[in-house]
Amino acid sequence: MELVTDQENLQRQENLNHQESLQQFTEKLQVRLLSLPQNIPVQVQCVVRRGNLMVLNQHAPDEKPDPRLVFRELQRAIQTWIPDFTEAIFNSSPVSPTSQAKLYLRILGQKHPYAYHYFNLCLPNLAESATQELTESLPNSIKQIEETLDRREEANQLPITGSELVLRPTDPDWESFSLVEQSSFEEKTIPQVQEASGRSQWLPWILAGVGVSVVSFAGGMFLMSRPCMIKQCEPLEKAEMLSQQAAQTLQKAKSEQDLRQAQQQLTEVNLLLKGIPAWSRRHGEAQALLQADQSQLTWVERVLAAESQAESAMQKAQKLPQSAADWQQVQSLWRSAIAQLTPIPQVTPLYPYVQQRLAVYQDNLKTTDQYIVAEQQAQKKLAVAKSTANIASARQGLAQSPENWQRVQVTWQVAVNALRQIPNTTTSFAEAQQLLTEYESKLGIARDRVNQEKLSKYALNQATTLAKKAIALQQQNQWTQAAATWRSALNQLNQISAGTLYYDQAQPLLTTYSTALEQAETQLQQAVAQQKLRADLDRICAGTPKTCIYVMTPDLIRVQFTPTYEKTLQQAYTAGQAGNYSLLGGTVNHVDSLQTALQTLSNNAGIPLEVYSSNGMDLLGSFNPGG
């Protein structure tokens, strides 16, 4: 009874070891697919049946992995790793040179796979390798002892039900297998040790016991001195702890310093895992973790490289202004940094940090692009301003008419506007400011000349209009208004600036209008004098009775006594003859006063004066100026 109990315990332990080895192998395949650049999103499950390794790969309905890529990568991985897992995986299953790996690809939730692939495993003969263990040298014997112990640890597959791994109807091997073994596949997890077999179940233990007895002391010392040769593996445990810490650091990373810390942790993980020897029982587990962490380390190094390029870009961008070529170097750095981060998959702990940095990089790239465009546009505007200024200078040298000068002004304005649009963050700004001072001065000259031409044209038009008005007034003998109008016309001509188109036209008119003004003023003086003369004559001829009437010409003043006045004179002379000397004396005094007034008037007017009787025929007297 004691022997049966030990055998059951050994069988149970071997089953557990088989499950652990198969799980490690499955995890390695899973990690292999996820660590590829394509990041193949499939779930891997493995089971051993009739000496064949069956691998089921399932994916979500919305994922579309390439079956050829999946099967190619799995075949490479299996052919590479299967020698290290052959004994642990196939120890409880019949093995032959025709043993195969059967790979299936199925949509999660579906009953049947939609693609499959088979290939031969070419496994070694386990029985023959067991019989040769005692013929090896001492170190090799120690390794063969451990391998022999591992081969004896039988274990069943992971609990996968028949409904989860079903071949397409076109696969007769799997159909046969599923019909014969479906009940055990769904219900049995740890099959019992078979009593009947092709060879004794105790023979390997006897051989192993002999081997141990031969090398007990030296082998024991060697095993105790090697890492991970017993169940506990401190390097692997420490590596797993550091790997978890690195993942947490990456998930919470906020700065480059956090990435450096994770990089250091992952590097230490690599060193620990690489120190676990190939013949260790934990070597497969270590290799799976190593491959996963190496993938993480690769992504971390990509991010650090991107951060380095970003830092270089930031430093180069600090200098303002700089040329388009310099900005293009900054642009290249940002693009390279973005290219480093873009392939990093979402499944990595780095992904949140990467997305945050990508947003920053893309914003900075956009700003850099804007600087490049601004620099290029500034150079174009500067070139346009210079070219336009050359055109303006040429036009200015030929300008004659107001229209020409208007075109010169507009051209200078275009050049100035182009310079004013150049931002101060560009290399063209300094030169633009120097040219702006020069161009604005020339624009001012052109603007003043345009204004002068406009004013001169207006003044000439006003002068000619006023001259026409003055002539009309002269024709109406309105000499006061005519003289004033001629003065206004001359004032308009004097406002025409020298050098303008209308200046030469105004010079002859100045002489003409000046002469007309003098004539008008002379006529005005004469009119004023005649007006005063008439007033004086009206005063002299006034009275009761009215003394005289007159007619004025430029050469003669003709005064004629009124009949009433002549009658009064005759009456006075008659009275005087009659002895009325008082009336006669008064009349004589009046005649003397009239004579004196007429003489003075003739002298003042400078015009001869003649006095006639009331019939206008008899000349009574005449007066000459100064006579």
Image (spheres, grey):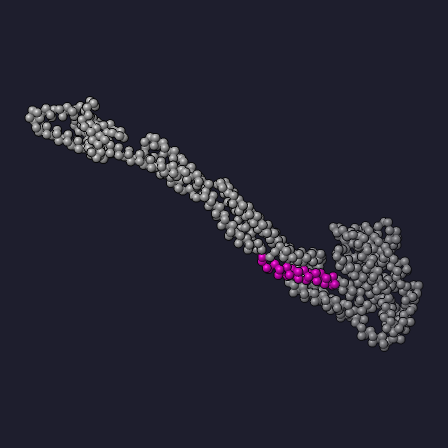
Looking at the figure, which quarter contains the C terminus?
A: top left
- Residue at 72% from the left image edge and 65% from the top image edge: 266
Task: Locate residue 165 relative to residue 247 in the image: left or right.
Answer: right
Task: Locate residue 269 relative to residue 563 in the image: left or right.
Answer: right
Does 1 appear above or below 458? below
Question: Where's residue 4, x and y in %?
Answer: 88, 68
Does 470 appear above or below 103? above
The residue at the far front in this view is 627
Residues 251 and 418: in front is 418
- Residue at 74% from the left image edge and 61% from the top image edge: 295
Question: Where's residue 404, x and y in %?
Answer: 51, 41
On whether residue 9 falls in the magenta region, the answer is no
The residue at the far left in this view is 579
Res 102 → quadrant: bottom right
- Residue at 61% from the left image edge and 58% from the top image edge: 317
Residues 250 and 8: in front is 250
Which residues, given as a range, are shown in magenta? 293-321
Residues 561 and 329: in front is 561
- Residue at 74% from the left image edge and 50% from the top image edge: 62
Magenta span dominant secondary structure: helix
Does 221 appear above or below 191? below
In this rendering, does residue 548 appear at all?
A: no
Looking at the figure, which quarter contains the N terminus?
A: bottom right
The residue at the far bottom in this view is 217
On whether residue 314 falls in the magenta region, the answer is yes
Res 97 → quadrant: bottom right
Question: Where's residue 13, x and y in %?
Answer: 83, 66
